[in-house]
Amino acid sequence: MIVMRRYMVLTALLLVLAASVSAQNVRTEEMAGNEVYLLESKVVQGDTIPHIVLREVKVVPDWKFRNKRERKTYNRFVKNIKVALPYARAAAHKLNSINAELGQIEREKERKEFLKEAEKELFNEFEKPLRKLTFSQGRMLIKLIDRETGDTSYNLIKEYKGGFSAFFWQSVARLFGSNLKDEYDGEREDRMIEHIIIMIDNGML
């Protein structure tokens, strides 16, 4: 059990190191204790009016359960996604800044040193909370990493840590019923997971 738990922590941390995705920032500033938003403007018939692009809100119907077993699966997914999704998104945003700095480093030796230091910082930040993940939540994290980054965990680890490392962690993942090469398919295989994420993002779950 200790070895299995250690595997899950190390795998999750490697995925954190491997993830990258673009983040959108909302510009806000604090002024006299009040939150002030900087709005864009638009000229309409000679008048300047505030122009705000509203966040897209997806309207989805409740999931229609075929049987009690599917309802239990759905409820289990809700629990695991609520735990794993914040880690997947935090990892994506965290590595976005790392990627930006990597782009400014040309020498291979300096890139390796930078990644080694970044990995150390990520271990310090994420190790304790990731130790609390169950294996089901760890497998969900692997799947959600692919959703948030658009690339499989295997390819991301291979890019950052090398082919041998990716092969090693894929072999270990196989022992515990996971596959780092699995791709997220929100239209078919992972349609239930996608439904749950949309519901969560819209405050409906």
Image (cartoon, rainbow, N blue to C red):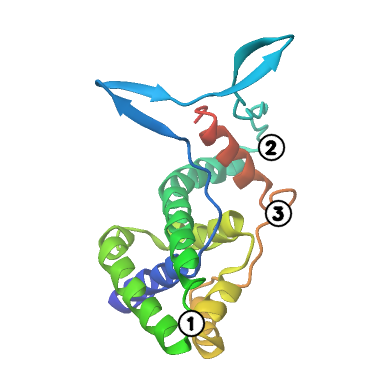
- Whether residue 24 is situated above or below residue 33 in the rendered picture: below
Q: Give the residue at x 25% y 21%.
A: 33
Q: Which residue is mark 1?
A: 161
2 or 3: mark nearer the eye: 3
- Kind of residue sitting beneath label 1: Lys
Which quadrant of the structure image shows residue 184?
A: bottom right
| Mark 3 burial class by Cα count in 10 Å: few <14, some 14-19, many 20+ | few
1 or 2: mark nearer the eye: 1
Counting residues from the start of the chain, the first of labels 3 and 1 encountered is: 1
- Whether residue 99 is situated above or below residue 144 in the rendered picture: below
| Mark 1 burial class by Cα count in 10 Å: few <14, some 14-19, many 20+ | some
SS assignment at label 3: loop
Q: Which residue is mark 2?
A: 66
Counting residues from the start of the chain, the first of labels 2 and 3 encountered is: 2
- Specify the farthest residue to the front: 46
Q: Give the residue at x 48% y 47%.
A: 81
Q: Which residue is mark 3?
A: 189
Q: CA distance from mark 3 to mark 1?
A: 29 Å
SS assignment at label 1: helix
Q: Give the residue at x 59% y 61%.
A: 146
Which residue is at the front of the view, 121 or 107?
107
The answer to whether residue 179 is seen in the rendering is no
Which residue is at the front of the view, 66 or 146?
146
Q: Are marks 3 and 1 in contact (CB under 8 Å)?
A: no
Q: Give the residue at x 53% y 82%.
A: 166
Tell me if 120 is positioned left or right of 134 in this view.
Answer: left
- Kind of residue sitting beneath label 2: Arg
The answer to whether residue 200 is seen in the rendering is yes
3 or 1: mark nearer the eye: 1
Residue 204 locus on image (x, y percent): 52, 27
